[in-house]
Image (tube, rainbow, N blue to C red):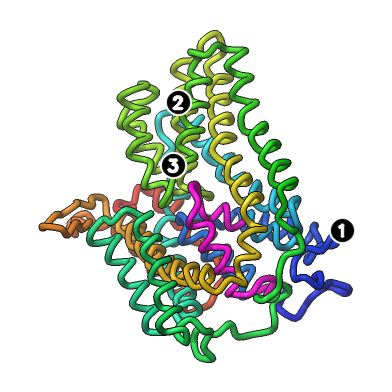
Amino acid sequence: MTAIDQPPGLRAGADGGAAAGTDVIPLRQATRTWFAISWQTFGGPAGQIAVMQRALVEDRRWIGQQRFNHALSYCMLLPGPEAQQLAIYTGWLLNGTRGGLIAGTLFVLPGVLALLALSALYVAFGSTAAVTGVFAGLAPAVVAIVVQAVSRVAQRSLTHPLLIGLAATSFGALALFSVPFPAVIAGAALAGWLIARHKPDALKPSGGHGADDGPAPLIPDDALHHEQPSRRRTLRILAIGLLLWAVPVAAVAVLTGTGSVFTTQGMFFSGTALVTFGGAYAVLAFVAQQAVQTYGWLSAKDMVSGLALAETTPGPLIMVVQFVAFLGAYHNPGGLDPWAAALLGALLTTWVTFVPCFLFIFLGAPHIERLRGNRRISAALTGITAAVVGVIANLALYFAEHALFTDVDDKTLGPVSLALPDLTTLRPAALAISVIAAVLIFKLRWSVLRTLGICAALGLGAALVGLPGL
């Protein structure tokens, strides 16, 4: 559906969200869109945000750029995969709670299925050359998609030199000085507040390149969602969410014992779900250390292989914990069949990792909607939005280095810590696929899905003929 091809009778509630009993977008149509988006969520948060930006803000005009940025800024403050949380938030805006549930579930479902299949192949055969070849073709393609994302988000969000400077500062803090992600976000919020106080015109949307041009979105930037925050609502969601989160862990503890691998995994990954600030990379080192050295669920080589598989499957990178749990339960099945144990461990870990995301959004979104009218809070979130551009750019750099080079070394010079690729380990085939993807997206303006399909075929062909440098 194009920006002007809205189905007859489609309307937003007067309050700008899914009015009581009414969807901004027919639920069936929204579900089809989220299903299509879910198969394009390669490339980590940068690529995933780019896909939603293009599909929801630019192509369909379901949500305005400022509203999208506001939701993204909130999600960046939360532990867990921010892109999936953004999908939940947007789905909630369009279709209420059921829309958020559908969007968030579909967002991770392809990755869950793909990584389950790859985990089984890894355990059974120890090699996934052909399948990995397909995903290896996708990885360099995502480099071009992410570059496009950085460009588009920057053009629409960085409407003043001060905001451009804030984005550049955030990028430098992360890429050069390894400043902790929470510190970058806190600093950006403070900077946004100070800019609003001393230079308020800097935060006003401009009419130039950063303006949200095009037909008016179905959800206006200045409208409020109908769902009011209340103590009763908060307690109800908190009770339901905590029960859904805890019951499966309690069940495996009763059925398999408190010392079983399933109970241990359920408790451990429930904890990691609460500390994944700054994306998966911030917590994966801790997960790897505990899984390999403390619990002995898998080897260091297995962990690297799992990360490689998770990098090239759709969905959040934190999905690698599913691979860790699969192998851990397979190697320590207790009284179960190893394959049944592996499936149980993987699904339980996936559940406790992603259920908190729904809880955070459904609890906080109504409050965040009301805070859009608070100038100080809005200013702080605008600062965070500018910083997000730098964060995405940093993630894009990280992904490009690891997609196009075999070895990336950390170099330290005083306070500067820089990841530099070994130029002699350039992957020629991966670089060629990345260039082709850039031509398809920027020159020929092909869709993301069509581009990914071509690059997947190229990756498979390169793997089957044994072409080096993939």
Q: Secondary structure at mark 3?
A: loop
On screen, residue 358 versus residue 290, left or right, reads: right
Q: Is residue 166 visible?
A: yes
- Which callout, 3 or 2, points at the residue further toward the start of the chain? 3
Marks counted in the figure total 3
Which stretch appears magenta? 59-87
Residue drawn at the location 51% of the way across and 63% of the way down:
73
Decide which of 231, 14 is in the foreground and name it: 231
Q: Position of residue 455 (x, y in %)?
A: 47, 60
420 vs 130, nearest the viewer: 420
Q: Which residue is mark 2?
A: 327
| Percent coordinates x, y for residue 350 in the rendering | 56, 35
Task: In the rendered view, tell whether residue 464 sits above or below residue 138.
Answer: above
> Taking 31 as reference, is 111 above or below it?
above
Q: Which residue is mark 1?
A: 21
Magenta highlight: main SS: helix
Three-letter code, disc 1: Gly
Q: Which residue is mark 3?
A: 275
Cβ–Cβ under 8 Å for marks 1 and 2: no
Farthest residue, direction left: 414
First-in-chain label (1 vs 2): 1
Residue type indicated by callout 3:
Val
Tell me how far mark 3 sits from mark 2, CA to CA: 23 Å
| The N terminus: image quadrant | bottom right
